[in-house]
Amino acid sequence: MGTTNQFKDQSISFTKRLVPWTLYALLPIVLLRLYFYPLPFPASPEPELPHSTPNTIISHTSSSPPPPPPPPEKEKAQEIPCDYFSGKWIRDRRGPLYNGTTCDTIKENQNCIKHGRPDSGYLYWRWKPSECNLPRFEPNIFLKLVENKHVAFVGDSMARNQLESLLCMLASASPPNLVYRNGEDNKFRRWHFASHNASVSVYWSPFLVQGVEKSNSGPNHNKLYLDHVDERWARDMDQMDLIVLSIGHWFLHPAVYHEGSSVLGCHYCPGLNHTEIGFYDVLRKALRTTLNSIIERRGGKDHGIDVVVTTFSPAHFEGEWDKAGACPKTRPYRNAEKQLEWMDAEMRKIEIEEVEDAKGKASKLGGIRLEALDVTKLAVLRPDGHPGPYMYPFPFANGVQEHVQNDCVHWCLPGPIDTWNEIFLEMMKKWQEHPRSEE
């Protein structure tokens, strides 16, 4: 009996020693098996990409062929258009394509370097869209796309500001020749690029519709006729291949509005027996009249036309513009520092909505392509890009003055407004890939 118990104890002791050694021996084998033949895990669902179109689900019977495999991830990404209007400003050491020496078409009031602006940091920022990169402007590509065409910038001084930026960028590759000039302050001009037989014009029309501007010798308010397009530019519409429209700031001024044979109302018109109606609906009516006129005159014709509406560009006055308001900042806002709101947001919203509404009308006739160049959000982040006091030459040469008028509406050249034209070029390149006849 004692011998039997002793044998059992020895067996148990041996088993206890054997089990750990067995596990130690098996562990490397298991690890090697997992390394070379890993266990399959269920795939996690891919996140939905922004701006992707919804998938169409089709059921297949057992006899139906299986659906084709999905395209590679690289091809999927290429199908998603980039939103060039959402992003941030980042540092860029390369700086602008031109300066006040290489370009002689800069309006004096926007030639900030020539007028003695001491800081140059505002020249070294680049717009970075959230989902892609914005290519640097390529003047030869732009000129190739407008070869044998007429590009017309129509609107207020912001249209002129954008035009002069474009001229300077193009001049880095091909010199423009001024072939037409008319009107006070050169408000109607045309340049010709002989290298590509391309013309670029500017038409002064601060309301796009017919209007009588306020003057020192006349009423201190504007008169707008909201149901009539301004023929000073519209009569040349048949000669235009691409129109860039830009309005907004002149609608903030005192005005009386006419529609048909009656007075619709006014904006800030004390002493006049008219109903105060503000300017938002008036801006909408003016833009709608303009786009409808283009559709009516050019829709359905063999010779098509492209129309771009550059959205409202916010001002950055700190204080009242006519009471020593200034824009002294020397760097862009970060996204969290400045949001688009109030009047700036409403002006942009109206312009975007009217472009979308006009697209629906134009699609029924064909021959017209409309797009919004939606610069409002990226412009509101650049308080540093305005001439400020350097709208005048060396404003502090004789010391700090008690009151110096600032320009916090227009943009220095070179400056942030060059970005408008970089995005404009990207829009045109997309049009080239998808001709109007395919739409």
Image (spheres, rainbow, N blue to C red):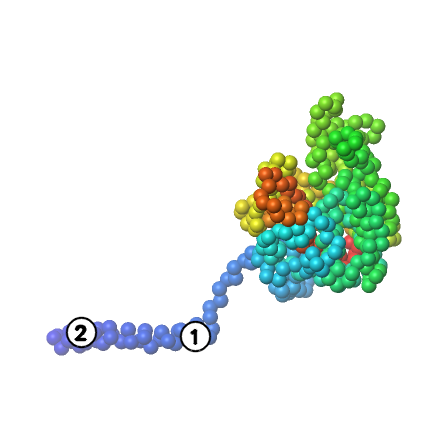
Dot 2 corresponds to which residue?
A: 9
Residue drawn at point x = 47 percent, y = 73 percent: 37
Residue 294 visible to an observer of this rendering: no
How packed mark 1 is, by other alpha carbons closer than 10 Å (few <14, some 14-19, many 20 or more), is few
- Image: 103 above or below 184: below
> Residue at the location (79% across, 31% down)?
217
Which element carries disc 2, helix, strand or loop? helix
In x, y percent, where is residue 376? 65, 46
**Residue 288 appears at what percent x and percent y?**
77, 39
- 269 versus 155 height, above or below: above
**Residue denoted by label 1:** 33
Point 61% across, 45% down: residue: 398
Which mark sits nearer the N-terminus, 2 or 1?
Answer: 2
Q: Percent x, y for residue 180?
A: 85, 51
* Residue located farthest toward the left when viewing the structure as drawn: 2
Q: Position of residue 182 (x, y in %)?
A: 84, 46
Residue at (79% x, 58% y) in the render: 176
* Callout 1 amino acid: Arg
Looking at the picture, tell me which residue is in the foreground, 220 or 341. Answer: 220
Specify the amino acid type for callout 2.
Asp
Q: How dense is the environment of label 2, judged by Cα within 10 Å: few (below 14), some, or many (20 and up)?
A: few
Who is closer to the viewer here, 131 or 189? 189
Foreground disc of the pair 2, 1: 1
Residue 251 falls in image quadrant = top right
